[in-house]
Amino acid sequence: MHYQGRRWGTYQAQETFKSYGVKDDMNPSTRIKLIQAVPESHRQFLSSLKWIHEQDTLFAPSRLICVHAGLRTLEKVEPQLHALHARDWKAIVLYEKNDPSRIAPLIGRFDVRGMPEDLRGRLFLCRDIMESA
């Protein structure tokens, strides 16, 4: 919540603001208002969520990985999976453009597009990022 709240206004998150009774007027104080409006139980729930979900499937290629923005395509997959399961903010392998404020699998926009080479044909990668035109 604190980490990405500063960016939500640029990603059509008006409904999120509205649901907490905060007017998204796109100024710096809006982030603070949102943080203050979110109940502690919601913060605890959001902070308890997994960063990644993996499971076997009954359909080919028999494995599914779900991660919000995707996996870094030019990095080895296993260190990324390990860091995501451990919820390791300090794992450099997750940084987009070597920027520790940009955890690529969670908020990436640049190097998470496509399938990492060492996973091609081995699994279905489910991601949910907004592509910009």
Image (cartoon, rainbow, N blue to C red):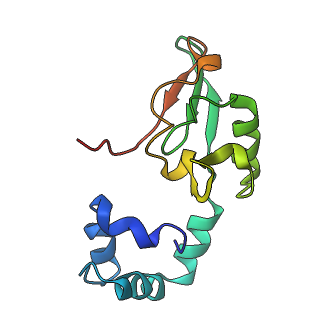
User: For this view, does 14 lie left or right of residue 59?
Assistant: left
Say which quadrant the C terminus sits in. top left
Between 70 and 76, the residue placed more toward the observer is: 76
Q: Is residue 24 left or right of residue 49?
A: left
- Residue at point 40% right, 67% down? 7
Note whether 42 is above or below 71 in the view shown. below
x 49%, y 47%: residue:
108
- Please tell me how many numbered marks the rendered image carries: 0
Q: Residue at x 74, y 54 (%)?
A: 88
Q: Foreground: 12 or 76? A: 76
Query: Residue 118: x and y, percent?
Result: 65, 18
Q: Is residue 107 left or right of residue 9?
A: right
- Please state the horizontal and vertical placement of residue 10, each as a whole percent of the image: 30, 63
The location of residue 61, given as percent across then percent down, is: 56, 12
Kindly identify the residue that appears in the image at 70 percent across and 58 percent down.
89
Residue 90 drawn above or below residue 77: below
Q: Nearer the viewer, residue 70 or 63?
A: 70
Q: Position of residue 29 (x, y in %)?
A: 37, 88
Residue 31 position (above or below residue 57): below
